[in-house]
Image (cartoon, rainbow, N blue to C red):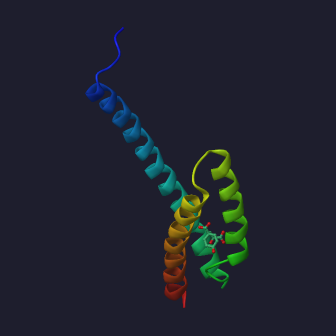
Amino acid sequence: MSDPTPQERLEQLRASIDNIDAALIHMLAERFRCTQEVGVLKARHEMPASDPAREARQIARLRALAEEAHLDPEFAEKWFNFVVAEVIRHHTRLADAAE
Ligand SMILES: O=C(O)C(=O)C[C@]1(C(=O)O)C=C[C@@H](O)C=C1
């Protein structure tokens, strides 16, 4: 079989990107389902919304995984901090509603 044209190769790659983006959305939704339950638990038991020690451990772990996977560890850390900021916002809202 002949090599794909540049346009065909672009379309093949975009089909893979579409699948990866869909998987990421589903994984993020699953993560937020878990953190939502964590938020309810924390609000009910008056636990602090954030846990900086847990975050530090997770950042170290994710940076190491990123390096192994040839992904920029700075990017991995930024992604984690971005997601955690949103989680803490949700936790805080739940705690305020429980007061
Ligand atoms: O593990 C927790 O205690 C959470 O609330 C979850 C989570 C996270 O999204 O990974 C969010 C906030 C905390 O500071 C630490 C971790």
Q: Is residue 85 above or below residue 73?
A: below
Residue farthest to the top? 1
Identify the residue at the far bottom of this view. 99
Res 31 visible: yes
Instruction: Name the residue at 44% across, 42% down.
Output: 20
Ligand 1 resides in the quarter of the picture at: bottom right
Work out which quarter of the rendered image holds the N terminus and state it.
Answer: top left
Residue 88: which quarter of the image? bottom right
The relative height of residue 84 versus residue 47 in the rendered view (above or below) is above
Q: How many marks?
A: 0
Q: x and y percent of residue 74 in the render?
A: 58, 62
The residue lying at 64 percent from left, 78 percent from top is 42
The residue depicted at 63 percent of the width and 45 percent of the height is 69
Say whether residue 89 is left or right of residue 77: left
Q: Quadrant of residue 13?
A: top left
Horizontal and vertical percent position of residue 75 = 54, 60
Q: Position of residue 70 (x, y in %)?
A: 61, 46
Residue at 40% x, 40% y is: 17
The answer to whether any part of residue 36 appears in the image is no
Q: Nearer the viewer, residue 33 or 54?
A: 54
Looking at the figure, which quarter contains the C terminus? bottom right
Dividing the picture into quadrants, the one containing residue 31 is: bottom right
Seen from the viewer's position, the closer of residues 97 and 62 is: 62
Can you say whether 27 is above or below 88 in the image?
Answer: above
Residue 22 shown left or right of residue 34 in the figure: left
Residue 26 x/y as whole percent? 46, 49
Q: Which of the pair 13/92 is nearer the observer?
A: 13
Along the viewing direction, whichever of 43 and 7 lies nearer the viewer = 7
Residue furthest left as drawn: 7
